[in-house]
Image: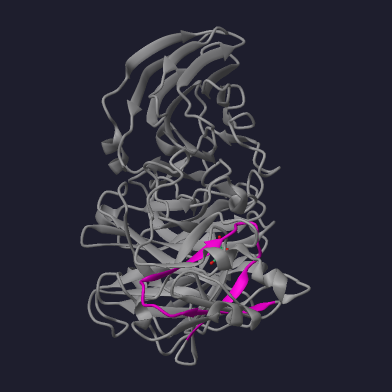
């Protein structure tokens, strides 16, 4: 009787402990009447975002957006009820879908499937493509790595995270950390959206002298508070980056134009903190300085009209390096750009130059021009920034291994996106006398190598392919040295028994290296996905030495110790288990061929 009466008044049957009242075609109340840990929200990836106000004691405790399921449930995401204890929790849900009547709202799959639970299952349900040794979120959407710092033996990695779905939304700083840059421990959310907005990218520093007033060794983070406008806000942590207190004087930098992704560092010669801010739509980076991390003075700007300009400028970084490892000091300014990248969509460009604590002056070529330079020549390397306070003078970076062109459409759902492998950045002098960024796999990655299944092999190459077996699960690092000899092209093909393949080619005449993923597996989710990416090899020799890392859905190639890097994601229906080597237009030679199985990360 009770149920019938309630239904007549617009309520619907729901799981134990949940009461649902439909207030109209676009507004539904969800009452939680039992104290379980999680409310599991049923999500349909292709639905539109509903707005959910979480109301406790008559106040909106948080607002989130989730693609609540309409006609099918792809997966569920947990809303953690622990912060509200025994207090009653009410969700006011506003749907964006236009509906003729309440009845249509009642039919949504979300209401039949919403449940309470004391557990949330994060075990891997997408084994086929979830990387085995790259950082991924446990679940949900991820973009930029940010706020990274090293302290007390741990590499802390924060990332742009949507805890409530697998598309971009609800930007939150997710958190993981590692002692070896390979195995990542997942930690509770670090910084959640507040009344100033969601939490966009930023950076963290270890404030050794306590200059900001949070104590010696406090971790201080600056991020963009993103709402109708973008302003810069500060948070501090006195427990090594596990939890952050939002500063009550936020925002600490305000502007009337779109600016984001503050990246700060200590500049020893001037005794000041320096910050770069991406003046996104103006295609420039703004430089600020500070003595206390709270009060910032605008000093200069760099970039108008320089380098690649065909997209917004985002996620800056700036740091000194020694040319060729031990030469003069030069500064490298990283500028992530979207779109307008080397192969379309997003990519990381950089500038070399000098920095005096206030102004960045870029290097110019013989004609006085500032050349456009790319840090990675694949399609899937974005938002790359470095760890602050890395040990031994290292400049270690990590990027988001996707591209805004199709990141929200890639065929995974429990998690969406991984980070690249960590890399050590350097500056080298190219054959043209210009300075370039090198990007080499971090030394920790050597520990991934299992006993080689192909060891120090050599092969004369011709048009008839020489094949080598790869591990059955496809996870491996391949190393080899190629001498093109008289050939015009050397091909390295990764393939599986379904005929799917990724073809890498070395072109000695043009000194370029390419990767063709048009036949690599599932490619039809976006017209921008099938692609051939190409890179200069920055060499005037007839040889190239390669390290190729293959994970379940990525191929990363590093040439000649990192003089070029190429990162591409792939979605083969089964692992690539064969490597075929051949040459065109003459014979070539491959030597020092090693295949190291990789089993780490699981
Ligand atoms: C880059 C970016 C940043 C911004 C963040 C938001 O991918 O657009 O500029 O802070 O993503 O998630």
As drawn, is 457 to the left or to the right of 66? left
**Camera-side residue of 274 and 361:** 274
Identify the residue at the far bottom of this view: 58
Q: Is residue 65 above or below residue 123?
A: below
Q: Position of residue 156 (x, y in %)?
A: 32, 61
Range of magenta residues:
26-55
Q: Residue at x 53, y 40 (%)?
A: 569
**Camera-side residue of 504 and 300:** 504
Q: Residue at x 38, y 30 (%)?
A: 476
Q: Is residue 213 above or below residue 345?
A: below
Q: Position of residue 467 (x, y in %)?
A: 46, 13
Q: Is residue 29 magenta?
A: yes
Q: Residue at x 26, y 56 (%)?
A: 391
Identify the residue at the far front of this view: 1
As drawn, is 351 to the left or to the right of 243? right
As drawn, is 70 to the left or to the right of 115? right
Location of residue 362 (image quadrant)? bottom right
Q: Position of residue 26 (x, y in %)?
A: 69, 77
Q: Position of residue 283 (x, y in %)?
A: 64, 65
Q: Is residue 229 visible?
A: no
Q: Residue at x 48, y 69 (%)?
A: 15
Quadrant of ligand 1: it is bottom right
Location of residue 464 (image quadrant)? top right
Q: Is residue 159 visible?
A: yes
**Camera-side residue of 446 and 305:** 446
| Dominant SS in magenta | strand
Q: Quadrant of the N terminus?
A: bottom right
Q: Quadrant of the C terminus?
A: top left
């Amino acid at each position: 009787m009770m149920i019938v009466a309630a239904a007549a008044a617009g309520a619907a049957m729901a799981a134990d402990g949940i009461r649902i009242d439909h207030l109209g075609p676009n507004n539904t109340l969800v009452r939680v009447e039992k104290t379980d840990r999680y409310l599991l929200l049923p999500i349909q990836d292709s639905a539109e975002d509903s707005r959910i106000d979480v109301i406790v004691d008559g106040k909106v405790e948080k607002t989130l957006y989730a693609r609540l399921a309409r006609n099918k449930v792809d997966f569920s995401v947990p809303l953690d009820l622990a912060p509200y204890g025994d207090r009653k929790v009410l969700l006011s849900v506003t749907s964006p879908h236009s509906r003729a009547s309440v009845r249509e709202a009642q039919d949504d799959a979300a209401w039949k499937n919403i449940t309470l639970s004391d557990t949330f299952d994060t075990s891997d349900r997408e084994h086929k493509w979830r990387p085995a040794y790259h950082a991924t979120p446990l679940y949900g959407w991820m973009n930029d790595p940010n706020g990274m710092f090293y302290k007390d033996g741990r590499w802390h990695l924060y990332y742009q995270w949507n805890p409530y779905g697998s598309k971009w939304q609800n930007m939150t700083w997710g958190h993981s950390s590692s002692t070896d840059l390979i195995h990542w421990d997942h930690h509770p959310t670090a910084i959640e959206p507040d009344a100033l907005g969601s939490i966009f990218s930023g950076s963290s520093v270890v404030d050794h002298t306590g200059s900001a007033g949070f104590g010696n060794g406090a971790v201080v983070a600056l991020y963009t508070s993103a709402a109708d406008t973008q302003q810069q806000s500060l948070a501090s942590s006195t427990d090594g980056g596990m939890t952050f207190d939002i500063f009550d004087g936020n925002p600490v930098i305000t502007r009337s134009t779109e600016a984001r992704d503050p990246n700060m560092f200590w500049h020893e010669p001037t005794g000041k903190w320096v910050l770069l801010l991406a003046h996104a739509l103006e295609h420039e980076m703004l430089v600020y300085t500070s003595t206390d991390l709270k009060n910032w003075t605008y000093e200069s700007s760099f970039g108008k009209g320089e380098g690649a300009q065909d997209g917004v400028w985002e996620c800056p970084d700036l740091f000194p390096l020694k040319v060729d490892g031990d030469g003069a000091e030069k500064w490298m300014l990283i500028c992530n750009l979207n779109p307008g990248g080397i192969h379309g969509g997003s990519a990381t460009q950089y500038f070399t130059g000098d920095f005096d604590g206030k102004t960045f002056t870029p290097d110019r070529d013989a004609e006085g021009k500032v050349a456009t330079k790319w840090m990675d020549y694949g399609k899937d390397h974005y938002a790359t920034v470095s760890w602050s306070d890395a040990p031994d003078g290292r400049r270690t970076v990590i990027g988001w291994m996707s591209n805004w062109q199709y990141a929200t459409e890639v065929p995974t759902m429990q998690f969406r996106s991984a980070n690249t492998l960590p890399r050590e950045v350097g500056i080298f002098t190219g054959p043209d006398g210009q300075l370039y960024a090198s990007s080499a796999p971090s030394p920790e990655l050597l520990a991934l190598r299992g006993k080689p299944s192909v060891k120090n092999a050599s092969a004369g190459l011709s048009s008839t392919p020489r094949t080598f077996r790869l591990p059955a699960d496809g996870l491996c690092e391949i190393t080899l040295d190629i001498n093109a000899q008289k050939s015009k092209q050397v091909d390295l093909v990764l393939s599986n028994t379904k005929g799917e393949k990724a073809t890498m080619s070395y072109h000695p005449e043009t000194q370029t290296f390419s990767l063709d993923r048009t036949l690599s597996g599932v490619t039809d989710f976006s017209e921008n996905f099938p692609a051939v990416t190409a890179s200069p090899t920055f060499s005037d020799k007839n040889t190239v030495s390669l390290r190729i890392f293959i994970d379940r859905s990525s191929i990363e190639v590093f040439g000649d110790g990192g003089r070029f890097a190429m990162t591409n994601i792939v979605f083969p229906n089964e692992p690539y288990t064969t490597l075929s080597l051949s040459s065109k237009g003459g014979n070539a030679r491959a030597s020092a061929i090693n295949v190291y199985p990789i089993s780490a990360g699981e």
